[in-house]
Image: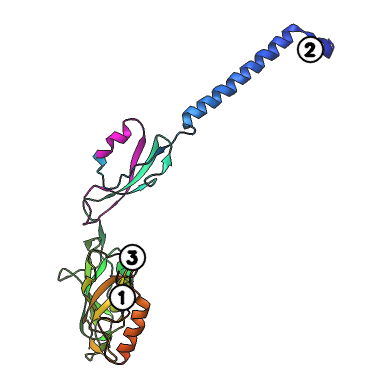
Amino acid sequence: MKIIDFFKSKRVWINLIAMALVTVVLVLGTMQYLKTYTRHGKTIETPDFRGLQMSELDQYTSGDYFEFKVIDSVYDSNEEKGSIIDQDPKPKSHVKKGRKVYLSIVAYHPKKIKMPELTSLSIRGAKKTLENYGLQIASLEYDPSQYKNAVLRQEYLGKEIKPGEKIKKGAAITLVLGRGRKSEKINVPFLIGLKKSEAIDRIYSSSLNVGKETYYNPADTANVRVYKQYPKPFKNKKVKMGAPIDLVYRNNRKFDFQSYINEYKQDSLSNRPKDTTTTEKIE
């Protein structure tokens, strides 16, 4: 049979048309299925779940809106136990219906870790090790020793704690350090204008302790820097190792700290630092 005769056959055309129709139906059906399966073009806004308890999420699962999965728990004594503190996707994100939401909640009890070995480390090394373990410094104490600024003992709640003992994560450890054979005095560091974390680091690095911490405006404690310190940083002012330094913090958004620091330094060098200066800009 010649090709031209083949295409003149009625049966051939019927088969070709049938095959084309089947192909169109399959393509349209697949597209509709994918559109329904992926909910193409339809998104919902993720609510803010932070602060809620897990039991309060039932209303969001009843219509298959979200699927929740707890991936982390963090102990925070300032937050309600079992409450949600973080979520992914973030609030007000636009997601498909049925999206998994990963949650972090406040643990009911702090995690326990093994106390690290700090003896023989320097204050800087001990502080870094404590931070790596999620612990912090309670205070520095000094005993006579030839090993100046080396950790002699590590204590928790007034008792020595051995390496490997279980302790709550976040606990504050007292470090007993060597002060040398003679009772040495330390220059008071200049802390004005430093961020809170920077000031505390410098105090401990100077073999001193953090004393009373207060805020110039107790209602505004974000983005603060050191506004005042006691003892004041007089020229050649010295204190005993382990002496406390009291700090007053102030928000840096509404205050000209640079001018204040420049004038404060001039007064410090002249041995008469002021509590306030003419450069204050209070709003």
Q: Nearer the viewer, mark 2 or mark 1?
A: 1
The type of residue carrying mark 3 is Asn
Residue neighbourhood size for the residue with mark 3, other residues' Cα within 10 Å, grouped as few (<14), some (14–19), many (≥20) = few
Relative to 207, is 43 on the left or the right? right
- Which residue carries the number 1 mark? 199
Callout 2 secondary element: helix
Q: Label 2 vs label 1: CA separation?
A: 91 Å
The type of residue carrying mark 1 is Ala
Outermost residue on the left side: it is 158
Residue 194 located within the stretch drawn in magenta: no
**Quarter that holds the N terminus:** top right
At x 63%, y 20%, the residue is 23
Q: Earlier in the sequence, mark 2 or mark 3?
A: 2
- Which residue carries the number 3 mark? 132
Callout 3 secondary element: helix
Magenta segment range?
Answer: 56-85
Q: Label 2 vs label 3: CA separation?
A: 81 Å
Is 119 placed above or below 88 here? Answer: below
The type of residue carrying mark 2 is Phe
Q: Position of residue 202 (x, y in %)?
A: 32, 78
| Contact, mark 1 vs mark 3 (Cβ under 8 Å) | no
| Contact, mark 2 vs mark 3 (Cβ under 8 Å) | no
Q: Which disc is residue 7 wearing? A: 2
Residue neighbourhood size for the residue with mark 2, other residues' Cα within 10 Å, grouped as few (<14), some (14–19), many (≥20) = few
Q: Position of residue 252 (x, y in %)?
A: 33, 70
Residue 58 located within the stretch drawn in magenta: yes
At x 38%, y 44%, the residue is 92
Quadrant in the rendering for residue 155: bottom left
